[in-house]
């Protein structure tokens, strides 16, 4: 596989892992392992907001890539699928087209539906209120307030403001 293709694969997978909430060490390790499978020495510097990666072949060719991550979520399902793909790359030495096809399938996976996310946020607040010896009324109020806060947070995020 060409150096450019290897770098494209490693940076796409690294970008998806980082934007899905993977730990920094996991992103670096996954990128290095994938590059090593195709005889590319990879050095990467990963931060929560982006990364740079430099790939070098045995014959001295070098490519450096810098990616900025603007939106981050926590999507453990996507991280799991990308980890499985990286293991398959290591074990089966997949070709470029197969890997890109798998990456695109994973990228297009739908996130949880909005009503389910709102309800889940409320359930978390309800549960923690109960866990800390709150009364049922306290838990119901926490459920309602958290659902409202989640809806407002999503609306603010869609307007382009930093979501905290």
Image (cartoon, rainbow, N blue to C red):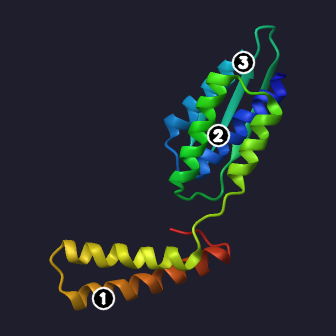
Mark pair 3, 1: CA separation: 55 Å
Q: Is residue 157 left or right of residue 96?
A: left
Visible in this render: residue 46? no
In the displayed structure, 33 sits above or below 114; it is above
Instruction: Return the residue nearer the eye: 13 or 24.
Output: 13
- Residue occupying the point 53% across, 83% down: 152
- What number is the disc on residue 140? 1
**Label 1: which secondary element:** helix
Tell me which numbered mark, 2 or 1, is placed earlier along the sequence. 2
**Residues under labels 2 and 3: Cα distance?**
16 Å
Q: Quadrant of residue 109?
A: bottom right
Q: Position of residue 102 (x, y in %)?
A: 73, 42
Residue 123, compared with residue 70, is above or below; it is below
Marks 2 & 1, CB-CB < 8 Å contact = no
Query: What's the residue at 72%, 18% (across, down)?
Result: 40
Q: Which residue is mark 3?
A: 40
Dot 2 or dot 3, earlier in sequence: 2
Q: Which residue is mark 2?
A: 14
């Amino acid at each position: 596989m060409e150096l450019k293709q290897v770098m494209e694969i490693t940076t796409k997978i690294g970008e998806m892992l980082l934007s899905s909430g993977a730990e920094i060490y996991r992103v670096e390790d996954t990128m290095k392992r994938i590059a090593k499978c195709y005889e590319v020495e990879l050095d990467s510097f990963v931060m929560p907001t982006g990364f740079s990666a430099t790939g070098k072949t045995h014959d001295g060719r070098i490519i450096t890539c810098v990616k900025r991550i603007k939106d981050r979520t926590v999507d453990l399902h996507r991280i799991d699928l990308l980890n499985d793909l990286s293991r398959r790359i290591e074990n089966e030495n997949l070709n470029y087209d197969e890997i890109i096809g798998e990456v695109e399938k994973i990228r297009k996976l739908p996130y949880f539906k909005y009503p389910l996310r709102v309800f889940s946020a409320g359930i978390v607040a309800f549960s923690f209120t109960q866990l800390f010896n709150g009364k049922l009324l306290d838990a119901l109020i926490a459920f309602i307030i958290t659902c409202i806060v989640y809806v407002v947070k999503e609306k603010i995020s869609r307007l382009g403001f930093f979501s905290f």
